[in-house]
Structures are given as C-alpha cells and as structure tokens.
Image: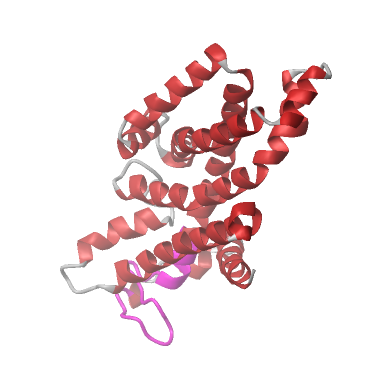
Amino acid sequence: MIYIGLAGIYLLGIFFLGIFMPESAYEVNYAEKLIPPCADHLFGTDFMGRDMLMRSVKGLSVSMVIALLAAGVSSVLALAFGVAAAVFGGKLDAIVNWCVDLFMGIPHLVLLILISFMLGRGAKGVTAAVALTHWPELTRVVRSEVLSVRSSQYVRAAYKMGKSHLRVAWEHVIPHVLPVYLVGVILLFPHAIMHEASITFLGFGLPAEKPAVGVILSESMKYIAMGKWWLMLFPGLMLLLAVMLFDVIGENLKKLWNPDSGNE
C-alpha cells in the first residue's frame, strides 16, 4: 500500500500540475537559451530558452491524458470481447480470436503508425491508434478467466434456473474477472504512454508545437552532438520513471487483489 500510495501521489501530481500549468511557465525566452541545469532552471533550458522542467512536466501530463483516454477505450473493448467470446462461444468466440490473432500478427509499432497516419495524426490519430491496438492481450486474459468461471457450479446452476447469458455474465462472470481486469487496465497505461511517445518521436503523432515528451526527445536529438545532454536526459528519465511507477502500482495491486498471491 505504501508503494502504491507513493507512486500514485507522484503520478497524480505530474498529471494535475501539467494540466493546470499556464503556457507562461514554459514560454520562449531567447535570452536564456541552452542554459545547463542550474538553480534557476533545474533541468536547463532548450534552444528557444524554454524551461525544460516545466516543459517536461507538461509533456508528460499530455502523454498521460492520451494514455488515459486510449486505455479506457481499449479496456472496455477488451472486457466486452473477452466476456462475449467466452460466454457465448461458438462463432463469436472464433471471430474474436481471429481478430486478436490479426492484430497481434502485425508489428505493433507499424500498426500504430498506420492508424495514426490514416486518421490525420495529431491527438485524435494518436489516441485512436493506441486505443485500437492495445485491447488484444487484455482480451485474451479476460477470456481465459471467463472460461475458468464458466464451468463452475454456481454458473451452471444459474443457467438451470433460467437466467440468460447476459444476466449470468453481468451477475456472476464480470465480478469474478474484475480484479484481473482492473490490474490489466492499469498495466495498459505504461504501454500507452510509451507508444504515444514512440510514434510522436518518429513524426507520426502529436505536432511539433505540442509540448509532448516525444516531441521534446525528437528535438533534442539535433543537439546531442553539441554536448547539450540535458535536453534528452531529464525528459527521458521522467518518462521512464512514470512507466516504472505504473508497473509498480499494477504489480502491487495484483498482489492485493489476486487470491493466489495472497496465499503465497
């Protein structure tokens, strides 16, 4: 609980600080361009004199907003497909498995770039690309959990009492898979953040005027050979730390919610 609390405080602090941060906090000031880390600018400044600490916080919060939207949509798709495939079975199960294999058979980054490019890139394209490519793995997890529940005695008894597939799924199946599902949703966040930053870094995501982590890292590549190491180091470390903390939250929640982990 301590690990979850500390990680949550840091991530929520970055999230809300970035959302409510005014543009004046990272405004252009050519008189202070390319200043190394110092007391006034802890992360230094970039080639336009913008404070790298404020810009990195804003960029990470933008990535977290996109990850929140994308992971929410993707997790709902995964829950619906996984439960439907396992409860109804038959042709529906075969179709869902075929779609999962299709999405997982294409290289992930290539599929992200294709979807984002088709939808015009920008925030809309990136969010849609991440949302439409992150449901297959969670769908498989949910489906396997539902299959283990479907053969239990209380589910069979519910069917014999005349309850429909939808009612059984809502009353008996979904509550059982909810802990696994919620952990899977949380573990979607680091993947979503990393993939948003990746395609933005490659030029297929958010536009250059957006203070996103991918944009910051892409711009800093031009100045590494000039010895301006702080332009990439600190934003990269902040991105890495956020991803690791989401993993910490997910793994510790899994220990709390999973009965097998509790017994161990």
Question: Considering depth in this image, is 178 or 51 the residue closer to the camera?
Answer: 178
Which residue in the rendered view is the most extreme toward the top? 91
- Magenta span has 41? yes
In the picture provided, is 157 more to the left or to the right than 8?
A: right
* Percent x, y of residue 6: 59, 72
Q: Quadrant of the N terminus?
A: bottom right
Residue at the (64%, 59%) spot, across then down: 256
Count of numbered badges drawn on the protein: 0
Dominant secondary structure (helix, strand or loop) of the stretch shown in magenta: loop
Question: Considering depth in this image, is 246 or 119 the residue closer to the camera?
Answer: 246
Q: Is residue 188 visible?
A: yes
> Quadrant of the rendered structure where residue 56 is?
bottom left
Relative height, residue 224 to residue 81 (above, below): below
Relative height, residue 107 to residue 165 (above, below): below
* Percent x, y of residue 21: 57, 64
Residue at the (47%, 69%) spot, across then down: 54
Residue at the (56%, 31%) spot, across then down: 143
- Magenta span has 56? yes
In the picture provided, is 219 more to the left or to the right than 239?
A: left
* Percent x, y of residue 153: 73, 30
Q: Is residue 27 visible?
A: no
Which residue in the rendered view is the most extreme toward the right? 161
Stretch of the chain drawn in magenta = 33-59
